[in-house]
Image: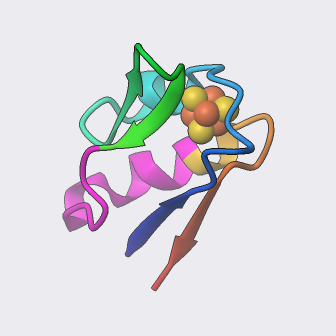
Amino acid sequence: MRVILDPQSCQAYGNCLLTAPDVFDLDEETGVAIILQERPPAELHAAVEEAVRSCPVQALTLED
Ligand code: SF4
């Protein structure tokens, strides 16, 4: 699994970091999400999938 963020779409709602705080954070300067683990370990996949679904602006996508 690879997590991809479109920083231009991110509106800093924060849903992703609330759902998967080990994988996402918010850059306080730019106000845009940052990905802490681009290839998260298997035990985090369910949380990451939930985080991707929770993004209101579809700024997150997953690749195999
Ligand atoms: S949920 Fe989407 S819009 Fe909100 S911070 Fe995460 S990537 Fe950005």
Give the quarter of the figure containing the N terminus: bottom left
Q: Tell me if residue 38 is in the magenta stretch.
A: yes
Q: Is residue 56 above or below residue 4?
A: above
Q: Is residue 56 left or right of residue 42?
A: right
39 and 54: which is toward the camera = 39
Coordinates of residue 58 in the picture (x, y in percent): 76, 49
Q: Is residue 33 above or below residue 6?
A: above
49 and 34: which is toward the camera = 34
Q: Is residue 24 left or right of residue 19?
A: left
Q: Which residues are magenta?
A: 36-51
Coordinates of residue 52 in the picture (x, y in percent): 60, 49
For the point 55% across and 46% down, which residue is it? 50
Q: Is residue 3 above or below residue 26?
A: below
Could you tell me how many numbered marks the image carries? 0
For the point 67% across and 36% down, which residue is it? 10
For the point 54% across and 70% down, which residue is it? 62
